[in-house]
Every structure is written in structure tokens, then in C-alpha cells.
Amino acid sequence: MNRRELLMTMANGFGMAALSRVLAASSSASNPLEPKTPHFTAKAKHVIFLFLNGGPSQVDTFDPKPALEKYHGKPLPGANQVISGGGIKLPVSSLMKSPFSFKKYGQSGLDASELFAKTAECIDDICVIRSMYTDIPNHPPGLCMMNTGHNVAGRPSLGSWLTYGLGTENQNLPGFVVLCPGIPIMGPQLWSSSFLPATYQGTWVQNNESDPEKLIPFLRGGFTGQPEQRRQLDLLGKLNRLQLSKEGPSASLEATIQSMETAYRMQAEAMDAFDISKEAEKTRTAYGSSDFANGCLMARRLVERGVRMVQVYFGAGQPWDDHSDILHHKSLAQQSDQPIAALLRDLKDRGMLQETLVMIGGEFGRSPSVQATVGGLQNGRDHNSYAFTMLLAGGGVKGGMAYGATDDFGLRVAEKPVHPHDLHATILHLCGFDHTKLTYRYSGRDFRLTDVEGRVVKDILA
């Protein structure tokens, strides 16, 4: 072999080597949602996150504080006057007792308020984390932290990390579904895949409709049947693969291909999965008829069909943000208590609770005092990032227990603090992952859901 032949052979080899990398990348990206093996045996195969956006009050729901009865109408002991930004002196807000009664439930004897009496009937299956805290008492950073593990938008969401690590069991449905009757504060950034491949982003469904044709508009082709759609999709697939072979791997193009394939397959199963009219009347009655109730029932139907994570927002905006009147919590609880209890019972009756982790809570809590304003005192509570409550059930969590504690007034965590990083580390552990090893390399460093923090809360593991 002369020099010219050697160079020609090597050049061809380089080309084939490059092509093999492209084809390998294309092959690995052909089904990024296929089920994957976690680091160790998982206790939870699915996650349902019932998000009570706006910040429910812990001292009016699952963290009773008898001291508020004693100090009702008085300032917090040891507090001094504060000066507002406008230079106007205001008295320290008076403490306010809960207007709702508490009592003990279940064999565990845990306390809960009348607001969540039906949910409390399932208390022996629930772990009440009373020592949650977060960093910033504002909705956008609080929502981002609880959903993405960071105070600023731009990081992948919990659901995206789970589908990235585990894939999903049903290729005819998205791996991560978000149900909300509108857009919550921050919107799609809360279920974004960010720098993870776009196929792991949450699929938002506006669940203020019960007709699946309206829930997922434009899913069915209006002019062609499935055979014609399949041929069109195959042609587009060939063109896309040709582009990939010429230009190299493209995350956006690969995500587009996967999204189109998922949308095509969804036609066969999505309409059935979202059609709650197929449930028995007894079941629908048990859940109730609100948007949140429909979302809880859809969540059960979706995880039953193999969807990895479903997040159900209570409503658009921040409905639990009761600054002016905490009594408004009563009407909110009337819409949420029954569906939450029905979901927990339904999962348990079907033998699904053991492998489905259900999370219930918001982005932070509320103050034990009346919110003070220049015009006087109102009957509401302000934001509180120093202490709030989160409920966990199923999926390898101990039921009938309270973990951690706040001070006598429910203002700050006093025992066993749990940050959202710790909560996320625990969720990933239950799903079979060492949170320090579920990483994705981006912009020169390895990122993870828990950033550089987080510890597994082992005491709540069954």
C-alpha cells in the first residue's frame, strides 16, 4: 500500500467513525423514555405531587399550637416595634389563634384541623413533616425551590429528573404530566427540563375540562387517519435522520422527533387515560367534581397506566395565599380535602399506594400572627419561609408519624429541620437513586437536583 492509498483508507475510516457516532447517538435517542434501572431497588415507582400553591398555613392545618390560644391578640414574646420602609412605626403583629378546631385521628393519634378532616381519616398512612423550611418567603423563588431545587428559574424540575433517571413504563403516554386549570405563578418554568433533553419536560394539561377531546386539543389529525399519519411520520423521520447524519447530534431535533412519536402514540391511549367518565359513579362521587378533584382522579388513572410522575396544581395563580382572611382556607379545603382523601383510599384499595409516593403541600407556610398593615390589622397571615408542613404517603414512607417540630408558635423550626434539598434527596432515594450520583453534565460541571446539598431523611423511611 502506497502513501496515497493509506491516506484514502484512513480518510474513509474517519468518516465511518464519525458516522458510527452519529448513528449511535441517534439510536440511543430513539427512545430516551424507555424504562431504566435505578442505582438500587426502588420503593416508589411513581410520584404524585398535589401542589397547594400559594402557601397553606401550617398552624391551621396539621401543626396545632395551643400557645396561640394563650397569646391570642398579644405580640410575640420578646418582639419589639418595627419600622416600615416608609418610616412609619407599626406595632408588631399580634399573634392569632387558629379559628379552626383540632382533634386526634387514627391509631397514631396525630392532630389535624377540621379543614382536612377527611384527609386526616387516612392519617395512619401519612407522614406529617412539620419541620420544613425554605430560603426566601416570596412565591417565585419558593415555587422554584420546591419544584426545581433552586431559587432561580432555569433548572430542571423534579419530574424531569425522575424521567431522566427512570424513563417511563408506558411509551404511549408522556413520562411526566402536569395538571392545572390554568397557569400557576412562574408557569412552565416549574415543569421545565431546562438543560436536560427536552423530551423530559412535563406535559401540561389544562384540566378545567372533563372531555378528553378538549383536554388535549389537536391530538387527533383532522384530515387523515392513523395509517396516513404513520406514513407521514415515517417520512419525517427519514428526513430528520438524514439531517442528523449530515450535521451531527442535535438535542432539539432529537427531542422534536421524540415528541412527535409520543404524540402519535398518545392517540391510542391518552383519550382513554384522561376520560374520567369511564370511572364508576361511586368512584367519581368519592373524589368530587372540582377541577382539583378531576386532577386527582386523572393522576390515579395516569400512574395506573405507567406514567412516572403526575403533578396536580390546586389552581391557577396562588389560591392559598390568604393575606387578608385566613377563613378563606375553609373554602379552599372544601375543594381539596375530599379529593386528597379519595386519592389515598383509591390507591390503597387498588394496591398502588405501596409503590406510589404521594406528596401534599405548598411552597412555604404562613405566619402565626395577624398580618399588619398601615390601615390596621387584618384577619390573614403573611408568608413564612421559616416553617411549614408537608405530607407524604405511600411509596416506602412510614405512615402515622409526625417528623420534626416547630416552636411553640409555629414560627420557626425547632427540631429536625428539613430543607427542600433534603426532601428531594429523600424522594430520589425512595425512587432508587443516590441523589449525589444522579447528575447531568452541562456548561462544564455536573448538575444534580439537590445542587451541592441535601440529605436523606432516613427516619421517615419504612
Image: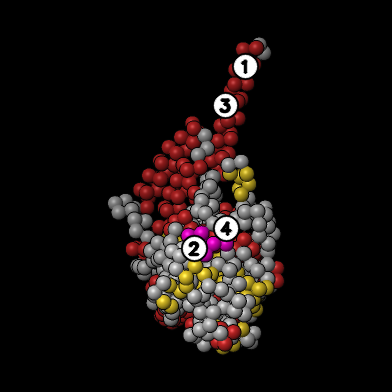
Sequence-earlier tag: 3 or 2: 3
Sequence-earlier tag: 3 or 4: 3
Estimate the spatial distance between the alpha carbons at disc 3 and disc 1, rounded to whole Å.
12 Å
Sequence-earlier tag: 4 or 2: 2
Amino acid type, label 2: Asn
| 426, 369: nearer the viewer | 369
Percent position (x, y) of residue 304? Answer: 52, 68
Percent position (x, y) of residue 236? Answer: 41, 41
Q: Secondary structure at mark 2?
A: loop
Q: Residues within 10 Å of mark 2 (few under 14, many from 20)?
A: some
Q: Residues within 10 Å of mark 4 (few under 14, many from 20)?
A: many
- Of badges 2 and 1, nearer the viewer stands 2
Q: Is residue 448 above or below residue 460?
A: above
Q: Which residue is mark 1?
A: 7
Percent position (x, y) of residue 264? Answer: 42, 53
Disc on res. 138: 2
Q: Residues within 10 Å of mark 1 (few under 14, many from 20)?
A: few
Amino acid type, label 3: Gly
Q: How is the image coloured?
A: secondary structure
Q: Are marks 4 and 1 in contact (CB under 8 Å)?
A: no
Q: Which residue is mark 3?
A: 15
What's the magenta region? 135-142
Q: Which residue is mark 4?
A: 149
Tell me the quarter of the picture where residue 393 sits: bottom right
Q: Secondary structure at mark 3?
A: helix
Sequence-earlier tag: 3 or 1: 1
Q: Residue at x 60, y 55 (%)?
A: 449
Sequence-earlier tag: 2 or 1: 1
Q: Residue at x 54, y 48 (%)?
A: 196
Q: Is residue 305 above or below residue 441?
A: below
Sequence-earlier tag: 4 or 1: 1
Q: Residue at x 70, y 68 (%)?
A: 458
